[in-house]
Amino acid sequence: MTQDEIPHAEHPEEKRREVISVFPASELLLDSEHAQEIWPQEIAQNKEFLRQLEARQELVRRLDVVLSCLLRPDMSLEQAVASGDLTQAQVADLYASLNTLLEDGSEYQRVLLYLPFEFLSGAPEFFKQTYLSAWEKLLSTHDVRANFVDGDVMEVEKRETDLPRVVKAAHLIPKLVEVGFLTVEEVLRRMDETDDDVLRNSIVDTLPVLRDMGFLEGDRGGVKETPEGSEVTRISIESQLDSDFRRIDSADYGDITKKREAWLKQDKKRKAIESASETIQRVLEAGILDCETGRTFVFPEASAQVSQAFVEGVRKAVEAKAREDQAQAQGLYATHRETLESLWQSRDSQVREALAKTFYRLHGLGIVSDTELQAQGLVIPALAGPFSENLKHLQPEVAEVRRIVEAVERDSQLSKFMYPVVLLYGSRLKGYGSENSDIDVAVFVRPDVDSKQKEVMRALLAQHFSHEKIGGEVAEFWTKEEGGELRVRDFEEYDPKIAERIWTYVLFGAAWEGDAKAVAELRTKLLVPYFYDDKKTLYNRDVRALYLEELERDTLQYRLMHKGYEKFYPSYGGMNTPHADSIDGKSMFWDSGYRQMATKLYASRVFLPKLDRSE
């Protein structure tokens, strides 16, 4: 038995089958040493399978070595070698492994979208040429733009047209010109020659940024001076937020679902608080909001949203000071530290979330100490993986899921519908979900179950999955037998509760709780077929490409890019020109620290061995 399969204690009087906890399959694919114990014999002894596992393990190892030696996320490899923090050999090894991902014919060229720009400056010529060849190929890929911004995509059943698209590889142009991979002349020529409207528009997006950076002639716009407004007080902020919230609540949101309307209102209120926090940031940086005035922004004098704006304003002001003078940043934090710590007793979850984000990010800048973080009961999760490390913070939820598995085994009616296995996935497992976040679970429906019985099955599922963090919301993988294997059934009619076969992020990214025999059967019959290249298509796309893109989307974008990363880490690098909004410059996509983490996650989790059935 391997370390990923841990049997749980059973009551002697109960004759139950062995229930085990299993690490996410994506983590098992980085363990070639125990392949014989994890995977069926015909796979574990396949030389090509083992070769691919070992190559990916080596990439992860080399990347870890390099990242662990960089003193700051925005430190280039050239600088690290010059300072003696890295050796030429370590950097050369990393370039060799990354080159393999980018070379012609590789399924993993999309890693290029996330590679730190600090890796490009001074890169060897062979890597530069491979990178540019892969970049050329990605110029034909139209991504959903919102995936790289805020993840705001309308529910499938409400979409009347396709979502706005972008060639995200084209948005990299300003950085590629900056490091010398491209010239402006090459960029303009491509813009003029292409027949692809999405590509042309994506290149046009970059032109204002190129002007800002001095690579194109023309008006650079400049940074507009913020006009001095009236005095900033708790009352003025409260009044503005009250007005904003009334307007948001009374707006007409049209024919959309209640769930989406609630999300839109919440997002607009978040942006209103964000705007108020920037007002507070400005007066803090100017030194015209002292400690006594700061205390008036705290409950019970102030509302929760005002307190939240104050917390965010202090964080932003301290971070801005830290970019120029660490001592001034520490002094500003010290001025308002007592006020912030008093707010930690707040019962408002949004205020506590803002405080946690502040403590985490200022810890990353060396302003909040380890001791202070521990005093608040805050632990930095394993956002870069392995996600199984985060299970220790989910013990009550894991125990509940285990109880459900055991209850399913005892329920003769429900066990006819589903395997005694439950998958645990989502933001809590990935580390950035709050304590109040729901836990996401999925089950496997047996192949002989008639779809006409789904409502009967769902009624039973609702009884067992009634925990407040689940609320009866269960994703269902309906299976079918095909040639001695199990496949996920796809249904023509959309049903939000039914999982699709391309949901690899759940199948390979979730932690498993279940009966040992059922887990082994599903791993052998359902997961292993994902390794074979059957040359199938779906939505007019190669199905393996879709499998890998789903792993990428869930692991690197939803919601790590949108809100997960920034909760715990301060910003470095980024796209900070006056017209950066034209390429969504406020997105964490551009942050040096995020790009390091995204590259590490891509290396460790966006991976499916590719095998030929004839071998």
Image: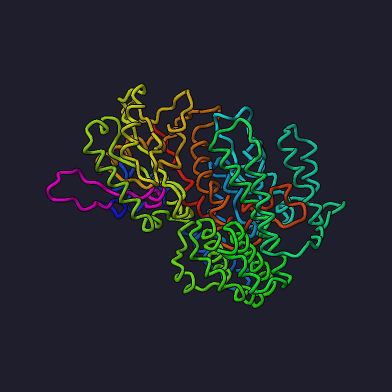
Residue closer to the observer: 488 or 482: 488
User: Residue 108's quadrant in the figure?
Assistant: top right
Query: Quick check: 514 above or below 179?
Result: above
Residue at 56%, 68% in the rendered image: 340
Residue 151 included in the magenta stretch of the image? no
Residue at 48%, 27% in the rendered image: 494
Relative horizontal placement of residue 514, taking residue 230 as reference (left or right): left
Residue closer to the observer: 374 or 583: 374
Taking the image as drawn, is residue 289 in sight? yes
Percent of width and height locating residue 43: 34, 41
Relative horizontal placement of residue 285, taking residue 295 as reference (left or right): right
Colour scheme of the picture: rainbow
Query: Quick check: 159 above or below 262?
Result: above
User: Residue 611's quadrant in the figure?
Assistant: top left
Quadrant in the picture for the C terminus:
top left
Percent of width and height locating residue 171: 69, 46
- Magenta stretch in the rendered image: 6-31
Percent of width and height locating residue 349: 50, 56
Taking the image as drawn, is residue 87 in sight? no
Query: How many numbered callouts?
Result: 0
SS majority, magenta: loop
Relative horizontal placement of residue 181, taking residue 474 as reference (left or right): right
Relative horizontal placement of residue 224, taking residue 497 as reference (left or right): right
User: Residue 441's quadrant in the figure?
Assistant: top left
